Image (spheres, rainbow, N blue to C red):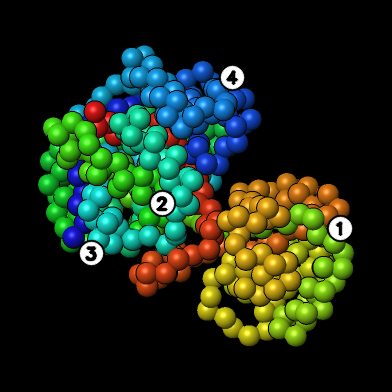
Amino acid sequence: MVVFKPFSPYMPIHPEDVAADPYDIVSVEEARAIIARQPNSFLKVDKPEALQENLSLEDWGQLARQELDHLYENELTVRPSGFYVYRLTRKGRQQTGLVATFSVADYEVGRIKIHEHTREVKERERVEHVRATSAHTGPILLSHPPHESLKQILSNATEEEPLFSFTDDRGVVHEGFMIPSRDLARVMMIGATIPSIYIADGHHRAKAAAVVSGMGGDPSQKNERTHFLGVLFPSDELTILPYHRVMTAIAPEEVENMLEGLSFSYVIDEEDGLVLPKEHGVFGVAYRGKYYKLTKRQEDPSLDVAILQRDILTPYFNVEDIRTDARIDFVGGNKTVVELEKLTLEPDRMLFTCHETLMTQLMHVADEGGQMPPKSTWFEPKLKSGLFIHRFD
């Protein structure tokens, strides 16, 4: 069973002025520009380095807390204890999720399944953020196999007047609802029938919540501290886009060597424009105005990003660890063809485009206790931070 716990969220009075993209997809420069236009942006809380640089980790956390306190005083209001609904609509496609708090114990014993290792530096930062703010400020994206009864409860809740509704600058409609109290027990009972759920995005936030739950604090708030904020969506409603790779400092002879070496195991076609793979086992390559389509000759059950790493990045470019190699960067699949092509304007830069990872693959890896390569999935649309806040002080 998985614990679905109701909570009393703090929510903004003016959500369109507060809601912000997740901290880890916004650069410091972008955050500053957003804050200049949107003074109550939640990026002040989630990305305090945009306000002041070169802070110690402790001072960084305290600044986040100060900004959150400012919002508590001026913009955030507490809502009744219960379960909530977060619905996102993008290009006519909807995803409707249960907003609740989830048990650290379920996470630690594997009922909340992971597919990615956390990085120590990012983990320390998120631990300090949760500790200093005494809150879970960014929802963890969770998923589960479709469950008809839960889906019906969420659908019924969305027939009521929304608590908030606004359209962001990407055209995504964000809506929030409260599940009627009469359905509270039913939601909790449904959790008891689900053997496990999956972290789709937010591994560092989940790990930080687990670490902070074991720290000292107000004993009366222990039950809140041992549960973290999440939004749980059925797997068939989530959209995963590919995560591409960009490499720098690439010499022409390296590319020639790669193409020659891969010709034994891949069909290599030169194309007129950028290749965006439509099927498993196909990769696009763009370098110095030339475009190639690489199609693996034999079926390979591995994830495409893992195949790319094993067959190309490591043997031809000596990329042993894509987390730390300075020559490699990552590009989400939300970029247009024009934006992707601009990335290759520099003569020493090469772009690898990939096919997206499927939710079924993600869940299979998690079920097997495996780990996916970093930056394997780009979920779109992104959940906004600052719309639901789980406070535990």
Q: Earlier in the sequence, mark 1 or mark 3?
A: 3
**Alpha-carbon distance for marks 4 and 1?**
38 Å
Amino acid on which the number 3 mark rests in the picture: Pro
Res 189 quadrant in image: bottom left
Residue 208: x, y in percent?
36, 44
- The answer to whether 20 appears left or right of 348 in the picture is left
Residue under pointer 3: 195
Residue under pointer 1: 289
Q: Secondary structure at mark 1?
A: loop
Disc 3 residue crowd, few under 14, some 14–19, many 20+, Cα 10 Å? few
Disc 2 residue crowd, few under 14, some 14–19, many 20+, Cα 10 Å? many
Residue under pointer 4: 36
Closest to the observer, 214 or 117: 214
Res 18 quadrant in image: top left
Q: Secondary structure at mark 4?
A: helix
Q: For the image shown, how many numbered marks are present on the structure?
A: 4
Q: Earlier in the sequence, mark 4 or mark 1?
A: 4
Q: Earlier in the sequence, mark 2 or mark 3?
A: 3
Residue 237: x, y in percent?
41, 55
Residue at (59%, 83%) from the top-left corner?
299
Amino acid on which the number 4 mark rests in the picture: Ala
Residue 98: x, y in percent?
30, 46
Amino acid on which the number 1 mark rests in the picture: Gly
**Alpha-carbon distance for marks 2 and 3?**
20 Å
Label 1 or label 2, whichever lies nearer to me, is 2
**Alpha-carbon distance for marks 4 and 3?**
45 Å
